[in-house]
Amino acid sequence: TKFVAQLEDNLSYLTVTDKFSDFTEAFGKALDNTCKLERPKITKRSRQNNPWISDNIIASVEKKHELKHDWVKSISKAHPEGNLELRKKFTDYRRVLNAVIKS
């Protein structure tokens, strides 16, 4: 393949004693030259496709993730449902955020 051929050409001058950074640089160049997309992919959740996604919504989603993380950390064998107070806080926040996003 093109990638392997270019990588072999770029690495042919290196010896075993050369730095690892030389290898990674040659590997990166070969990868970019043979596999890089001409036009980067745009996810369906980007601001370009969804201009209504504001900084505040992004911050709120991150807060929701933190609340869920805190609740999930509280789950154990002794408490299979975790801390119910943390769960209620997370679910209430999630419900309000979903309502805001859908409105």
Image (cartoon, rainbow, N blue to C red):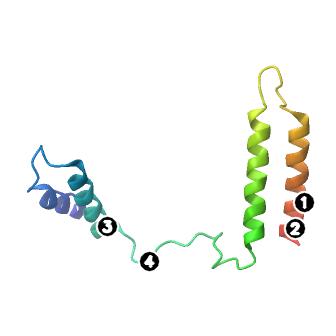
> Is the N terminus in the top left, top right, bottom left or bottom right quadrant?
bottom left
**Residue 50 point in image, percent of width and height:** 70, 76
| Element marked by disc 4 | loop
> Is the C terminus in the top left, top right, bottom left or bottom right quadrant?
bottom right
The amino acid marked with disc number 1 is Val
**Circles 3 and 2 in contact, beta carbons < 8 Å:** no
Which tag is nearer the camera, tag 4 or tag 3?
3
Image point (89%, 56%), residue name: 95
**Circles 2 and 1 in contact, beta carbons < 8 Å:** yes
Residue 100 badge: 2
Image height of 24 relative to 79, above or below: below
The amino acid marked with disc number 3 is Asp
The amino acid marked with disc number 2 is Val
Indicate which disc, 3 or 2, sits on the residue closer to the N terminus: 3
Q: CA distance from mark 4 to mark 3?
A: 13 Å
Q: Dot 2, crowdedness within 10 Å: few (<14), some or many (≥20)? A: few
